[in-house]
Each structure stands twice: as structure tokens, then as C-alpha cells.
């Protein structure tokens, strides 16, 4: 958890708890391929293991996503970041922040943790190069003091990778 979210983080609402418990049961019955939920007793923070899809640049590689749920989930998007080391990808910054519209402007309460994971795997799988975003160093430098990626004004302009 970033320091900025630590001070403002509240417990989950009843609606959020019910929704997450339902999603967790669904995950246990039918987990999305290439993902494994690392079980903890914290419903508000999930750590998910991501395995790169076969036949892609990320095949045989494993990463971890951290998903922090806000008080009013699913009306508000969760914060999703890669834990270190983050994959080399044109839309993933070295601090783990992910430039993916569904995590921000295009979020819908109909989305689930599974649908987020599938979108992230699709983003990884479609990449043709392993590299950081061009503005990685500047962005990461500006994110000091634990700024949340949800506080960033993202510019979604490239859907080719």
C-alpha cells in the first residue's frame, strides 16, 4: 500500500464486502487461467500471481499483482499495481503502475477482479517488445512519496501493445 492510500484508507462497505466475498468464491470455483490468488485473511488487499501466457514474450515468467479495494468497490475501481519486479512492458512503469484504461477512466462496476486480470494478461500477451514506457524515469521520479496511480491523469493513446 502506498503511503498516500494508507492514511486515507477506510474499511470496506457492506456492499464491497459482499461483492468481494462473492468474487472470491467464484475465483475458487473457476479461477482465470494463468492466475493464482495468494490467500490471506485480508479481503481488502489481494495479491495475485500472474503467469505469462505460452507463446508470448512473457511465457514462463511469473509476476505479482497487488489489488487494493476502496471502501466503495465496485462503484470505485480498485488500485492495481505490479509488485517488484514489474514486467518490462510499454504500459507498465518500473514502480509497478499500469497504464490501462479499465483501471481508471473506463472502469465499470460490472467488472471483476477476474476481468481485470484477463485484461492485464491480454495487454501483456499482445506486446511485441519488452521495454519501459518512454517517460518511465520522469513518471517514477514524480511518483515519489507513494503517489497512487489513481492520482495520475493518464493519457490513453496507444492500444497497439
Image (cartoon, rainbow, N blue to C red):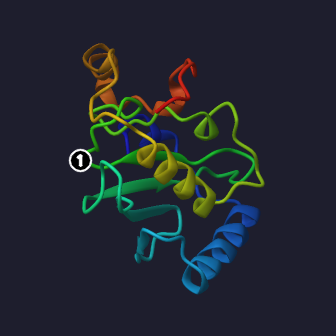
Please say if 36 is above or below 154: below
Q: Residue at x 60, y 86 (%)?
A: 29
Please say if 34 is above or below 87: below
Dot 1: element: loop
Q: Residue at x 72, y 72 (%)?
A: 18
Q: Residue at x 70, y 35 (%)?
A: 106
Residue placed under numbered mark 1 in the picture: 84
Residue 161 in picture, x, y percent from top left: 46, 33
Q: Residues within 10 Å of mark 1 (few under 14, many from 20)?
A: few
| Residue at far bottom of view | 29
| Residue at far left of view | 85
Quarter of the view holding residue 25:
bottom right
Residue 137 in picture, x, y percent from top left: 25, 18
Residue 159 in picture, x, y percent from top left: 56, 29
Q: Residue at x 76, y 64 (%)?
A: 15
Camera-side residue of 157 and 36: 157
Residue 49 in picture, x, y percent from top left: 36, 65
Camera-side residue of 55 and 138: 55
| Residue at far front of view | 55
Number of numbered discs on residues: 1
Camera-side residue of 52 and 146: 52
158 left or right of 84?
right
Please say if 108 is above or below 67: above
Amino acid at each position: 500500500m502506498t503511503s498516500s492510500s494508507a492514511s486515507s484508507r477506510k474499511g470496506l462497505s457492506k456492499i464491497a464486502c459482499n461483492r468481494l466475498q462473492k468474487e472470491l468464491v467464484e475465483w475458487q470455483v473457476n479461477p482465470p487461467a494463468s492466475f493464482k490468488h495468494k490467500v490471506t485473511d485480508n479481503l481488502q488487499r489481494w495479491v495475485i500471481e500472474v503467469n505469462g501466457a505460452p507463446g508470448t514474450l512473457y511465457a514462463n515468467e511469473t509476476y505479482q499483482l497487488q489489488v487494493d479495494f476502496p471502501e466503495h468497490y465496485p462503484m470505485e475501481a480498485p488500485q492495481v499495481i505490479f509488485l517488484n519486479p514489474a514486467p518490462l512492458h510499454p504500459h507498465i512503469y518500473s514502480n509497478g503502475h499500469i497504464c490501462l484504461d479499465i483501471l481508471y477512466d473506463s472502469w465499470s462496476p460490472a467488472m471483476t477482479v477476474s476481468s481485470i486480470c484477463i485484461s492485464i494478461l491480454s495487454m501483456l500477451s499482445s506486446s511485441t517488445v519488452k521495454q519501459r514506457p518512454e517517460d518511465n524515469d520522469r513518471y517514477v521520479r514524480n511518483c515519489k512519496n507513494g503517489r497512487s496511480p489513481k492520482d495520475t491523469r493518464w493519457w490513453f493513446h496507444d492500444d497497439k501493445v
